[in-house]
Image (spheres, helix red, strand yellow):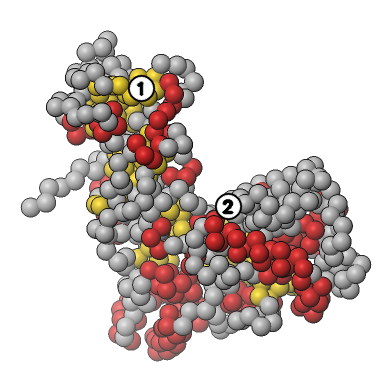
Amino acid sequence: MKPEIKRHKVGDLRPSQILFSFGIGSLVDLPNLSVMVMGTDDWDISHMAAISEDRLLAAVKSELGFQVERLCYPPIAPETEWGWNPFNEGSRVGIPVAPFPRWVRCPQCDLLAPLNLGVFELKVDPFRPDRTRYVHANCNKAKGAAPTVLPVRFLVACEQGHLDDFPWIDYVHRSGRCASPVLRLREWGVSGSVSEVQVSCDYCGAKERMRDAFAEGGKSVLPPCKGRRPHLRDYEEKGCTEKLQCILLGASNSWFPITLSALHVPAESEELEQLVEKHWAKLDAAKSPEIVAAFRQIGQLTAFANYTDAEIWAAVQKKRGAANEAAEAPAGLKVAEWEAFSNPDPARNTLDFELRQVESPKGFEKWIQRVVLVERLREVRALIGFTRIDSPGNFNDVEDIPKDHRAIISRNPPLWVPASEVRGEGIFIQFKEAVVEAWCQQVKELEAVFAQAHREWRRARQIENPDAGFGGIRYVFLHSFAHALMRQIALECGYTSASIRERIYSAGPKDDNGPMAGVLLYTGAADSEGTLGGLVSLGEPQTLARLLDQTLEQIRLCASDPLCGEHHPWRDGLSLHGAACHACLFSPETSCEHGNKYLDRTTLVQTFQQGRIPFFGDSNP
């Protein structure tokens, strides 16, 4: 019989953090502990609510398999009249974590040992979860209370997503074996540099400095990767051929989420169909008219008081058929969004999706076809995996991430994936297709430069089919415009630059679902009411015209010119952008779709780089 695992509350995380900061497979640094978030197999789904978003679910199925049934919120403890009680069953509701790394160090005697050695004791304070800790009960140098042990800050990982404790015993005994190793980890300086950290063995006297593990040839002194997946409590069955490399606890490259996101777009304009879509997570379980009637009897259909059971059942069948079609032949996540934004229909407005078209800003009518104020929107994001060492931002799309570099979130094919939703607002700007296409034909030379840089970038990362995935100079222009306008908007709307996100809609006339030429700049908050309208107010014609004038004027010169203006997309072998840097176009990682790649302000205005034809130039009517 499998023994029951003791569960203790050790902290709190926001739902959005579980996707983007501390998701499955990541390390959470607590006051006295370092813990790893476990895979979905260990999650208790009894307190998890489903999120309805068919297009995103279809995209997740195409990545993880058609066995995926739903998107789910992280578990939320039920609210009680008297607040949180550590002795209630609700106090055990949460995401499962386990201590990692398993090796810890006593700050008094410098003992370095794993937690299961038997010399460390877990201390739990049910009223103060932040005080949960391990102590060295029999420390011979402690004066008074047993000292709290600290997780070691050295780990090993590989590019296939495996993570393991540093091989302490093998590392310090490279010259021979030891019958009974007793290790100490000491720091001789105050800087914390690895050259000042030494691990030694009391039994045989072996000593090694940590600098060798982090040196240029550090991989040669480390053993082969064992394929350990601590978040799944197992090892890769097929093994691992990658070389291990040292990383530090809390390093930014220890975990990168792989996520998919979609904006909620109402598929119907009728009120009943919109209600069914909103409550689909519940109505999906209605497999017969009798179940619909039962739902009404237990008070689950209060929102449908004006409709009969037969009408609701007919709408459920219609919705189910549309959902099955979307799952069988999923279109791109942005296609439905582009159709809704480029043809705004007031009849489709709901509490989660509200559009209002306004006039184009004065002075920009020859370039901009439509401005739509997105007064309410809802974005759903799902976590489908993660990487280590190499960021997904180094790839253009999820499909480009090598399969063997994606770490899975469950031992078995997942039936659900963790997701979250935010509500907010945005501004959608659509450019005139004829003007965009004519300009693209004028800058074929610059497009060829970016195409070559795109190929070299993918070849350097051994991505199959290096020519695939290039969006053309059209995407470079739209991406650069979005970044430039985001920076200017952040100065006036009250949101930080990291809070504003972009969605680029780019496709040529010959592309699938094309043509598209537009950008959406939006922000969101986890609160059910969304945001306060500060971003939408900047989309009014007169205000937007002023912002666009300021935006174009600001990027004509850069504090890093002429170096920035003369930057070649593939000159240094590390970047994939033209005239762009942190002083002019770069945005925070949370804001950009493509990790600050495919940017060039010379596509927008005339800069130091002569001979270019900017989109907002006199030569582009």
Q: At which x and y percent is residue 613?
A: 85, 65
Image coordinates of residue 501 in percent, x first then y, are 63, 57
**Residue at mark 1:** 198
Question: What's the residue at 31%, 59% (across, down)?
Answer: 410
Q: Nearer the viewer, mark 2 or mark 1?
A: 1
Residue 178 falls in image quadrant: top left
In the rendered image, which quarter contains the C terminus?
Answer: bottom right
Q: From what the image shows, is residue 536 above or below residue 307? A: above
| Left or right: where 384 falls relative to 92 | right
Residue 490: x percent and y percent? 71, 50
User: Residue at 33% across / 27% down in the picture?
Assistant: 150
Q: CA distance from mark 2 to mark 1?
A: 38 Å
In the image, 595 versus 4, the foreground residue is: 595
Q: Quadrant of residue 99?
A: top left
Instruction: Identify the mark at residue 29; answer none if there is no mark.
Output: none
Q: Taking 65 as reference, is 183 left or right?
A: left
Q: Amino acid at mark 1?
A: Gln
- The one nearer the camera, 280 or 569, is 569
The residue sitting at 31% across, 38% down in the picture is: 165
Residue drawn at point x = 48 percent, y = 51 percent: 390
Res 246 quadrant in image: top left
Outermost right residue: 618
Query: Is there any visible trace of residue 489 in the rendered image?
Result: no
| Residue labelled with disc 2 | 590
